[in-house]
Image: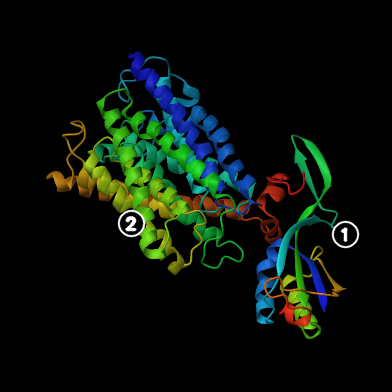
Amino acid sequence: MKLIIAIIQPHKLEEVKKELYKADVNLITVSEVLGHGKQKGVTEVYRGVKETGNLLRKIRLEIAVNENFIKPTVDAIIKGARTGKIGDGKIFILDLPECIRIRTGEKGGDAIG
Amino acid sequence: MNSGDTAFVLISAGLVMLMTPGLAFFYGGMVRRKNVLGVLMQCFIVLCVLSLQWVLFGYSLSFSPGNGPIGSLDWAGLRGVGLEPYPDYAATIPHQAFMIFQAMFAIITPALIIGAFAERMKFSAFLVFTVLWATFVYDPVCHWVWGTGGWLKNLGALDFAGGTVVHINAGIAAIVTILIIGRRKNYENKPVPPHNLPFTVLGAGILWFGWFGFNAGSALAANGIAANAFVVTNTAAAAAGLSWAILEWFINGKPTIFGTVTGAVAGLVAITPGAGFVGVMSAILIGFSASIICFIAVGLIKPKLGYDDSLDAFGVHGIGGIWGSLACGLFASKLINPAGANGLFFGNPKQFLVQLITVCITIVYTFAMTFIIFKLVDLTIGVRVTESDETMGLDLTQHREGAYTLLE
C-alpha cells in the first residue's frame, strides 16, 4: 500500500479529478495549502508597501492506493495537472503500513478501495 | 425652493450612491475568490472616475438644453449650475441637488456592465472603456429620455427612474461586451460556484435599500408620487423575490437564497421605469412576471445559447429593464400620476407603442455604439487579460493584492 501526496495548481483540480475518475480512482482527500518552489511566489503591494515572496495557493491531494493502482493514479495526476510551466507541482509516494476502514473495521488492502 | 424637497433629494442621492458599493458586494460574492478584489475595485473606481466625468462634462452633455440627440458643453465644469432651482427639471430644489442626484445614476449604470465581463477584463482597458461608454452612450441616451429637448422625451416615452437609461442601456452593453470578450477560460455552460454568497445577499440588501432613493427620489420632491414610488418599489421587489424562490422550488426542488435575491433585484429593475406611474396591484404583477421572464433568460436560454454572461448583467438588467419599460406602457395610470399617461390596460394602446419604440431605439443605439467603443479599446489596449493572468486571478495580476489569507 502507498500513500500518494500530490501538490498541484488550484485551477488544475477539476482536470485532475476528471482524469482520476477515468482511471477508476474515486477516493481522494483534498486540502488547500500554501507554498512555493522555484517560482518564489508573488509580489503583493499593500498601501504602497511591497511584499515579495508571498506564498501561492496550491492544492494538496492525498490518495491511498494498492500496488496495482500506483501507476494509473500517478499518470492521471500528471495528465490532469501538467501545463509544462513552472509551478505545476510535485507528487510524493510514501509507504503506507496500515489502513483501517472506520465503519467496518476492515484492514489493509481491502480497506483502501 | 422647498427645504423638505431639497433634504429628500440630497438624502436620495446618498442612497443611490450606496448602491454602487452594494453592487460591488452583490457581484463580488458571485465570483471566484481570486477575482473578488478585481470586481470590488472596478465598481469602486467607477465611483471615482465618473464622479469627475460628471461634473466636468457628463452632466452638461446629458442635461444642458442642447438639441435632440445630445446636450451642449455650456454647463461644463458646472458653469451656470448653481444653487437656485432649474425649473425645467426640478422647480423646488437647488440645481446642484438635481445634478448630484443624477450623478449617482451615471455612476451605477456603467458599474452594472461589470457583471458581464467579470473575471477576465484588463483593468486599464476597463477604465478607458468606462469613460468612453459613459460619454458616448450613457450621456446621449440620458439626454434623449430626460434632457430638455431630448427627442424621446418629446415623443412621450415614460421612464420614471431609469428603465431605459440605466437598465436597458447597461444590459445591452453587457451582451455586446460578452460577444467581443468571449467566454471565461474553461467555462462549460454551467455557473461557476460563487465564492461568498453572504456577500451577494448583503449586496442585494444594500441595493434594495438604495433603490428607495433611486425610485422615490426620482419624484424630485417629498410628495405623494415619491410615496407611491417607494411603495411599488418595495412591493415589486418582494413579489419578484418570492416568485423566483417558488419557481426554483417547483423546477429544481429547493428554493435558494441566491435565486431569491436575484429575483428581488429583477423586480427592482422591472419596477424602475413605472415606479411613478403604476399602482400597487400592477407592481405585484410586474414583479411576479419579471422573475418568470428573467428566470427563463438566465436559467434556460443562457445555457442553451452558451454565452458567458458571468453575473447575469444582461439576463437581469437587460431583460428586466426591457420588460419593465414595456410593462410601464401596459400598467401606467393617470389615476396614480396625472402628469404621466395611461397605458394599454387603461385604454391607451399608443403608450405601449411609444414604449416599444423607445426600447428598440435604445437597444439599437447602445448595441452599435458599445460595439464600436469596446472593439476600439480591444484593438488598441486589448480588453482581455492574458491566459496566465486569468488563471492566477485578477486580484494578484491586476492589483497585486489578495482578498483572503489562509494563514494568519
How far across and down, in percent of the image, does residue B384 sit? 62, 56
* Quarter placement of the N terminus of chain B: top left
Question: Observer-nearest residue: A58 or B330?
Answer: A58
Residue position marked by numbered label 1 in the rendering: A38
Residue position marked by numbered label 2 in the rendering: B292
- The single residue placed furthest to the left in the displayed view is B347
Relative side of B324 to A93, left or right = left
Question: Observer-nearest residue: B294 or B115?
Answer: B294
- The single residue placed furthest to the bottom in the displayed view is A68
Callout 2 amino acid:
Ile
Render colour scheme: rainbow
For mark 2, give the secondary structure.
Answer: helix
Could you tell me if residue A34 is visible in this image?
A: yes
Real-space Cα separation, disc 1 to disc 2, in angstroms: 53 Å
Residue drawn 86% across and 75% down?
A: A97
> Which quarter of the figure has residue B166?
top left
How far across and down, in percent of the image, does residue B182 sit? 55, 62
Disc 2 crowd, CA 10 A, few/some/many (<14, 14-19, 20+): some
* Quarter placement of the C terminus of chain B: top right
Could you tell me if residue B368 is visible in this image?
A: no
**Dots 1, 2 in contact, CB < 8 A:** no
How far across and down, in percent of the image, does residue B237 sit? 35, 43
Disc 1 crowd, CA 10 A, few/some/many (<14, 14-19, 20+): few
Callout 1 amino acid:
Lys
Report the disc number at residue B251.
Answer: none
Residue drawn 38% across and 14% down?
A: B84
How far across and down, in percent of the image, does residue B111 sit? 51, 43
**Figure check: B347 above or below A68:** above
